[in-house]
Image (cartoon, grey):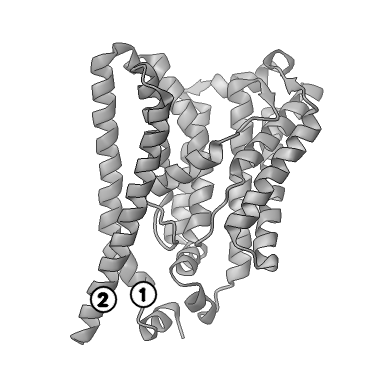
Amino acid sequence: MTVTEEARVAGRPTVQSQRSWTANVLKARESGIAGALIVLVAFTATQNSRFLSGQSIRDILLDTAILAVLATGQAVVMITRNIDLSVGSVLGLSAFAVGTLMNDHPGLPVVVAVLAGLAVGAVCGLVNGALVRFGQVPALVVTLGTLYAYRGVSYFWAGGGQINADKLPASFLDFGTASVLGVPWLVLIALLVLVVAGVVLRSYRAGRELYAMGSSPQAAKLAGIKVGRNTSAAFLVSGALAGLAGVLFAARFGTVDAAAGTGYELNVVAAAVVGGVAVFGGSGSVWGAGLGALLLTVIGSALAVLDINQFWQQAIVGALILLAIGADRLLAVRVAEALKKRESHV
C-alpha cells in the first residue's frame, strides 16, 4: 500500500492532494513576503536614504547569507515533522573550531576551513539524528539538550578566551568580504545551498520521501520509506549546514568566542516558519525559508536605521510566527474539508 492509498483509507489528505492545494497558497505567501520586503525597504528609504547605500545593502546580504544557510537546514528537518534547536550552538562550535584551526595553521587554504566546518557540523547533526532515531525522544527535547551540550563544549574549549581577527590569515578574512562581479562569496554560497536543496527536495525521490514523512509518518512507513534513516539524514544536513554557517560567520566577523551564534536558533526557526515551512511537517520550501531569512534581516536593519527599540523587532518576529502558524492550521483544515467533500461525491 502506497502513502497515497494509506492516507486515503485513513481519511487523511494525500501527499499529492496536499501539494496541489497548498502549492498556490505557498506561492502566494512567498509573494506576500516579497511584497512586504518591497514596502518595508521603500518606507525605510524614504525615512533614511542611507538605508539603500551600497554598504548597507551589502551588510544586509551578508547577514542574510548566514541566516539563509541555517534556515535551509532547518527547513529540511521541519519538513519531516521535526525541529533542530541546536543550530546556533553548532554554528558557534564550528566557528570556534575553524578559527582555532586557521589561527594555528595560517597556511591552510580556505577550502580546508570550509570542509572542517562541514565536518564539525555533520558530527553534531549525526548525534542529534541518532538520539532522535534510536532514543525515540522528541526532536524538540533532544535538540534543546544538545543546544546546551554543544555550547558547553565551546565554553570549555575556549576557556574564557577568544580568537581575534588579527590572528587569522588574511586569505580567510578576505573570503568573508571578497566578491565575484560585485556579489559577495558568502551570498553566492548561500544561493548555491538554496538551489541544491530546492532541487533535491522538489525533483528527487529523497526529497519527496521527506515530504511524505512529514505528511504522515505512519503512511510513510507502510509505503516502505525508511523513516529512521531519512530522519538521521535530515539532521545530518541541518548540522552540516550549521557548520558551514559557522565558517561563514568566522570569515565575516573575524573575532570569534564561545558565545558565537547565541540566539540564532530562534531566528532560524522564525525564518523557516515565516517563509511557509509548516511546523507540523509535510509542506514548505527552502526558497520560502530563504525569503523569511531576508525579511527578518531587513526588519532588523530597518528598525536600527529608524532608531526604533529592539524590543519591537522581537515583537514583530513573534507576531509573524503566530500568523504563519495560524495560516498553516487554517490551510490544513480547509484542505481536509475540501477533500472530504470531494470524496463524498465520488
Among the two numbered marks 2 and 1 on one chain, the one whose residue lies closer to the N terminus: 1
> For the image shown, how many numbered marks are present on the structure?
2
Q: What's the mark number on residue 339? A: 2
Classify mark 2: residues with Cα within 10 Å, few (<14), some (14-19) or many (20+). some
Q: Amino acid at mark 2?
A: Leu
Q: Secondary structure at mark 1?
A: loop
Q: Amino acid at mark 1?
A: Thr
Q: Secondary structure at mark 2?
A: helix
Q: Nearer the viewer, residue 108 or 18?
A: 18
Q: What's the mark number on residue 14? A: 1
Q: What's the mark number on residue 65? A: none
Label 2, label 1: how many angstroms apart (C-alpha)?
A: 9 Å
Image coordinates of residue 268 in percent, x first then y, are 49, 42
Q: Is residue 149 visible?
A: yes
User: Does residue 172 appear left or right of residue 181 in this picture?
Assistant: right
Image coordinates of residue 340 in percent, x first then y, are 25, 79
Q: Nearer the viewer, mark 2 or mark 1?
A: 2
Q: Is residue 96 above or below residue 306?
A: below
Residue at left offset 42%, top offset 28%: 311
Image coordinates of residue 274 in percent, x first then y, are 38, 45
Q: Is residue 182 visible?
A: no
